[in-house]
Amino acid sequence: MPRQERAVRTRALLLKSAAECIKEHGYDGSSTTDVLRRAGVTRGALYFHFPSKEALADAIVEYQKPLLQPLSSECPLQTVIDLTLSYARMLQTDVILQAAVRLVTEETSYQPGVRPYVWSQETAGDLLRQARDQGELLPHTDPGEVASLVVGAFTGIQLLSQLATGRADLLHRVCVLWRTMLPGIAAPGLLLRLRTDEQRAEELVQVDRAHGRVPCDAG
């Protein structure tokens, strides 16, 4: 195997192994020794890619960033919906994403430099302002307020779903959220054309994989 390919695979293995440890035991309950034991690599290999446990955690949190950026915004309101659907679907099965969520929602000694809530709220706000300008929203709708509501509601829903079913029903809950919210924010002419179904989420994950935003074996 070429050296560069081997390095890429080792980094991916370390990231997944660290994510499994953090998902199961939290940041403070995991050590680099635990990661090495799970990954089956040397400490030198670990430090070549990640100089510290904090660096591993940073990489796990950063893993989310591409998933919070839109591929297309032809219909900005649908794009906001799509981002939540694809993220919810990935969160059900992707151990790195699950670890990332635990890292940014638990009070631990780890403090991420930028919380994904900032990324997601800014992205949703920008898209919703585009939606307003294109006449996709009802006149009274404030894009910033809706963005804050969507991010807050999603955060609460994923936590409740995790506690209730291990996130097995997360995608369904997110679909229900949108079906409940949209009549209060979407222009009537657009409302019936918006997709909030679980099949849409499956299609979006396939698109993400095709564009290399997530590994083919994730989700």
Image: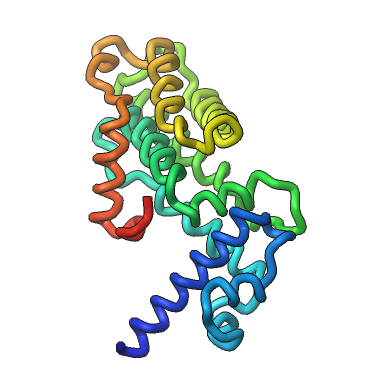
**Residue 108 appears left or right of 93:** right
Tell me which residue sits at (47%, 34%) in the image: 125
Residue 101 x/y as whole percent? 57, 47
Q: How is the image coloured?
A: rainbow
Residue 41 x/y as whole percent? 53, 82
Residue in front for this viewpoint, 16 or 140: 16
Tell me which residue sits at (40%, 12%) in the image: 139
Residue 155 can be seen, yes or no: yes
Tell me which residue sits at (24%, 35%) in the image: 74
Residue 180 x/y as whole percent? 43, 14
**Residue 145 appears left or right of 198:** right
Residue 68 can be seen, yes or no: no
Tell me if residue 30 comes above or below residue 219 in the rendering.
Answer: below
Residue 5 x/y as whole percent? 34, 82
Q: Quadrant of residue 87?
A: top left
How many labels, in total? 0
Tell me if residue 1 comes above or below residue 63 in the rendering.
Answer: below
**Residue 67 appears left or right of 122:** left
Q: Quadrant of residue 190?
A: top left
Tell me which residue sits at (64%, 71%) in the image: 34
User: In which quadrant of the rendered image does the N terminus lie?
Assistant: bottom left
Residue in front for this viewpoint, 62 or 26: 26
